[in-house]
């Protein structure tokens, strides 16, 4: 009998999931750089467009290389279906707008990436959708925010940039009791360390630009969940508004998935060592890392995550100190990306969360002394030396 890929270990899924070989028997996945497809007859074209015959129609609707990426990521996530997008932000926008209509209400965790916050605060209101922000760690706040027209919950866990962790299962129960769907941005935890769908979430969103590529090459995003939900909420919107992932980017991301588990575990091992060095330094006011026992939500992390990830945040007290730290780094790059093979550090107040008004940044505890660091694959000794030297300069 044929092997069922759902029975494979995660490492095997990452390498062989979704594989569709042509008649040539290629080992590396084929890259189909074509926008459209030919049909044997007018009747065959009619059957495909009607959904009565399998096959591809147009790159915006689907592509063999993109389909392999979607199938492999769905297998890794444990999802029935996946819809790939051109970027992580395209995935967030599609995930929300596919669930919401004019007159609907969204409840969102207050700690969001700057562009996600912009979508909720600036874009959705243009289409008649109102958002209430809550402290994502306060279950009563989620309950109290529910209205009769609440249709969706949105949470990042761990959140960007201060790594706040939400009890996904408990929030899912509140959402479902209200008749709403829970969308979880799982980019910091990756499918290796956290499974939101298993915990009760309805939709999981990724910026594949981060760990899935992990080597600074391409943009990409993905939405995952039950097949009926993805069909009902996203099929038509994805086809007609055009946030499609390019086949070339899909091919690059497929190759990234092959080494995702190896890279993320090594990055996490490095990050634990770097986080401990940061926490021990006299210049640091506070350190937050999901792999440390002093994380504010350590009990929740132990219940729903199997690793701390590769991002650490720390407070140096002022913008001046944070900038001195960044400027003194010799190995770690100053960059706003994360999840890369190369270590990167950024000052969120002036980069990733610059678009947030100061009052909103203060609501999530983001003052100007905070630095967010994404730890890569370099030697842990080199990284801790570089970080300690920069902290001395801070």
Image (cartoon, rainbow, N blue to C red):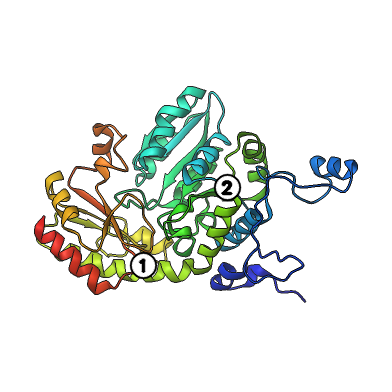
On screen, residue 258 versus residue 307, left or right, reads: right
Residue 208 drawn at (x, y percent) = 49, 53
Q: Which residue is mark 2?
A: 245
Whole-number angstrom distance, CA of label 2 to CA of label 1: 27 Å
Q: Please, what secondary structure does the residue beneath circle 2 have?
A: loop
| Disc with the residue nearer the chain's start (2 vs 1) | 2
Q: Are marks 2 and 1 in contact (CB under 8 Å)?
A: no
Q: Is residue 80 above or below residue 178?
A: below
In the picture, the quarter occupied by the C terminus is bottom left
Q: Which residue is mark 1?
A: 267
Q: Please, what secondary structure does the residue beneath circle 1 have?
A: helix
Dot 2: few (<14), some (14–19), or many (≥20) neighbours within 10 Å? many
On screen, residue 316 versus residue 311, left or right, reads: left
In the picture, the quarter occupied by the N terminus is bottom right
Q: Nearer the viewer, residue 32 or 361?
A: 32
Q: Is residue 121 above or below residue 362?
A: above
- Is residue 354 shown to the viewer in this render? yes
Residue 143 drawn at (x, y percent) = 43, 38
Which residue shows up at 44% across the image and 33% down it? Answer: 119
Disc sitting over residue 154 in the figure:
none
Q: Nearer the viewer, residue 85 or 184?
A: 85
């Amino acid at each position: 009998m044929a092997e069922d890929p759902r029975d494979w270990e995660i490492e095997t899924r990452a390498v062989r999931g979704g594989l569709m070989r042509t008649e040539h028997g290629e080992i590396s996945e084929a890259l189909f750089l074509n926008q459209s497809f030919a049909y044997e007859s007018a009747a065959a074209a009619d059957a495909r467009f009607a959904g009565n015959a399998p096959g591809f129609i147009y790159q915006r609707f689907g592509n063999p290389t993109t389909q392999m990426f979607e199938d492999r990521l769905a297998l890794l996530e444990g999802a029935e279906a996946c819809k790939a997008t051109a970027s992580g932000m395209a995935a967030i926008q599609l995930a929300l707008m596919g669930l919401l209509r004019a007159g609907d209400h969204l409840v969102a965790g207050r700690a969001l990436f700057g562009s996600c916050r912009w979508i909720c605060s600036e874009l959705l209101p243009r289409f008649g959708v109102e958002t209430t922000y809550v402290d994502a760690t306060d279950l009563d706040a989620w309950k109290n925010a529910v209205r009769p027209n609440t249709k969706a919950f949105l949470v990042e866990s761990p959140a960007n940039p201060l790594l706040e962790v939400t009890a996904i299962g408990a929030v899912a129960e509140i959402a479902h009791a209200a008749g709403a769907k829970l969308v979880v941005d799982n980019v910091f935890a990756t499918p290796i360390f956290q499974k939101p769908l298993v915990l009760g979430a309805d939709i999981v969103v990724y910026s594949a630009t981060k760990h899935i590529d992990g080597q600074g090459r391409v943009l990409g995003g993905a939405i995952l969940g039950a097949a009926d939900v993805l069909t009902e909420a996203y099929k038509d919107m994805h086809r007609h508004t055009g946030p499609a992932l390019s086949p070339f980017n899909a091919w690059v991301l497929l190759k990234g998935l092959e080494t995702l588990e190896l890279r993320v575990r090594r990055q996490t091992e490095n990050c634990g060592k770097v986080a401990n060095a940061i926490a021990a330094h006299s210049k640091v006011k506070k350190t937050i890392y999901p792999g440390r026992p002093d994380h504010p939500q350590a009990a929740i992390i132990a219940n729903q995550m199997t690793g701390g990830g590769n991002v650490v945040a720390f407070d140096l007290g002022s913008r001046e100190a944070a900038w001195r730290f960044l400027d003194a780094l010799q190995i770690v790059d100053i960059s706003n990306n994360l999840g890369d093979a190369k270590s990167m550090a950024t000052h969120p107040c002036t980069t990733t969360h610059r678009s947030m008004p100061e009052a909103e940044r203060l609501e999530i505890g983001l003052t100007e002394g905070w630095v967010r660091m994404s730890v890569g694959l370099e030697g842990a000794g080199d990284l801790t030396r570089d970080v300690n030297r920069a902290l001395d300069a801070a």
